[in-house]
Amino acid sequence: MTLEERIESARALRAQGYNCAQCVMAVFPEVHGLPQDVALRLSTGLGGGVGGSQNICGVLSSVALLDGSRTQGAPADKRAVYGNVSGLVRDFEQRYGTCICRELKAPGQTVGCNELIEAGIRMYDDFLKK
């Protein structure tokens, strides 16, 4: 799937009412290897900053799931996944000033969930190409 196809697919999912985490998770099927319905179900509770609690952005939660899905899930895999994910979180924070949903959505903020979804997809797509 091309980057443009990923973004268009995420936009279509968002228009249907899927949350940020679901929109990111569902557009990387070659990474997680799951049918779309399973990817959507697994990421349902991550939207709105994990269960709507407005903690860590659901976009980043799905990025963490995606990166973990590239491994066997063994204890030895943690170091690489933690390094990858923390680097992506740092990039996201540098761009938006925070990775916390309530801060991203605070009054006066101009960034919306759709922009964050697209940014997350671009970031992870770029990461995979490296």
Image (tube, helix red, strand yellow):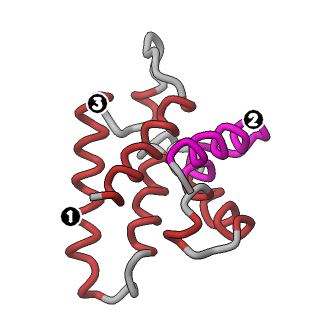
Residue 68 on the magenta segment: no
Q: Using the image, tell me which numbered label, if any, was put on residue 15.
A: 2
Q: How many marks?
A: 3
Residue 97 position, x and y percent, is 28, 28
In the displayed structure image, the side of residue 101 where residue 21 appears, left or right? right
Indicate the secondary structure of the residue bearing disc 3. Answer: helix
- How far apart are the two marked residues, 3 and 2, measured between alpha carbons? 25 Å
Amino acid on which disc 2 is placed: Ala
Which residue is denoted by mark 3 in the rendering? 95
Q: Earlier in the sequence, mark 3 or mark 1?
A: 1
Question: Tags 3 and 2 in contact by the CB under 8 Å rule?
Answer: no
Left or right of residue 44: residue 99? left
> From which residue to which does the magenta span run?
3-24
Q: Is residue 19 magenta?
A: yes
State how far apart marks 2 and 1 are (Cα): 33 Å
Q: Secondary structure at mark 2?
A: helix
- Up the image or down, 69 lies above or below 87; here it is below
Label 1 element class = helix
Instruction: Tell me the tag on residue 83.
Output: 1
Q: Nearer the viewer, residue 63 or 75?
A: 63
Kind of residue at badge 1: Gly
Q: Is residue 114 above or below residue 110?
A: below
Within the image, what quadrant is residue 64 found in? bottom left
- Residue 127 location in percent, x, y? 32, 55
Q: How far is the residue under mark 3 from the one under mark 1?
A: 19 Å
Which circle's residue, 2 or 1, is located before the other in the chain?
Answer: 2
Q: Residue at x 43, y 56 (%)?
A: 63
